[in-house]
Amino acid sequence: MRYIKFAVALILWAAPVFGLTVESVTDYGPTDRAVDLKILSSTDREIFEPVLKRYVDKFPDQRVQYTVASTSDISAYIPKSQEHFDLVMSSAMDLQLKLANDGLAAPLDLPDDLEVPDWSIWQDRLVGFSAEPIVMVVSKKDFVGKQTPETRRELITLIRKEPNFFKERVITYDVNTSGAGFLFASQDVRQTDSFWRLAEVFGGAKAKLVCCSGNMLDEVESGKSILAYNLIGSYAEQHAKTRKNLQVVYPKDYTLILLRTALIPKNAAKKSEARQFLTYLLGEDGQNHMTQTTGLLSPKSRSKLDQGNFKPIRLDTGLLVYLDKLKRKRFLREWNEALVQ
């Protein structure tokens, strides 16, 4: 058997030992040897599994353990116990950059022939391996005969015009608990002066606040919610293939582009194995296979990323602005005052 999903009992046992809430633990590769590479990631196993299976097929002597946890849990755990994992992957660019900036990441030492784009790597400590649009998703059946909002201003206007239609049927991240949700909201503030008006109309509509993209997609598919805001595009597109009520909307005013990033913890036990995995993932075969099987875009996909409304989130220290304790506290206070009405 090429991979094994651990029993629920093991996952429940792992949580207190690791010091973080573990969503799943899966092994890939030969079962008759010790684990060679331990990956901690915020990317759902179902999304990233094709890459992991391809990797152990190409390197049959490697056994990889893939652990999934939330972005916030990952960033809180690594400073306390970074030696337990060899590679850390997360969609929360700002939290990853903080770990690297705080000296908790080892040099990547990637081969020069990988030709990693300059905009997707930071100081040989942090690298983006996929680029993903941040989208809205609407319920097709509920928007029959209605205008589908294509910009944030249109969304504000629609909610104000039909408050009863949207009441308790809008859903988005709870930025108090979701690292990725906080990143997207803080980037919205930097992109548009209408963000706080949008937050206020969400509050007036009694928007639901949740931790994860999966919760939002389930709500829209069932019709309990009719619009989800700021979802990761790969999740939305993947679910839309089989869930026919989901319509993915790429906002025309601007569509944020997220980099999923990876770092090697400074005290990781298997740095060479982590570099081998990253070298494969960032290489031509790894990037092509990832793009074809997961819905994740390669940072090298300039033809798709150069669309006028696409706004890549810059991988630089500007990401740390809203992680300042006072700025973060002020942002969350304003957010909660707007959303919790």
Image (tube, rainbow, N blue to C red):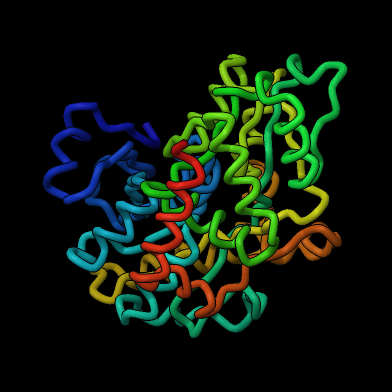
Residue 130: tell me if it is visible.
yes
Q: Residue at x 47, y 74 (%)?
A: 321
- Along the horizontal axis of the image, is 51 left or right of 141? left
Quarter location, residue 104: bottom left
Horizontally, is 97 left or right of 99 in the view?
A: right
The one nearer the camera, 227 or 232, is 227
Q: Image quarter for residue 23? A: top left
Where is residue 259 shown, x and y percent of the image? 58, 61
Q: Is residue 314 above or below residue 73?
A: below
Q: Residue at x 29, y 57 (%)?
A: 36
Compared across the picture, whether 26 is left or right of 211 comes to: left
Q: Quick check: can you spot residue 289? A: no
Residue 254 on image: x %, y %? 76, 56
Q: Position of residue 52 (x, y in %)?
A: 48, 47
Query: As rendered, which of 30 and 227 lies closer to the eye?
Result: 227
The answer to whether residue 192 is left or right of residue 96 is right
* Residue closest to the eye, 107 or 261: 261
Across and down, in percent, residue 117 comes to 67, 76
Q: How many marks?
A: 0
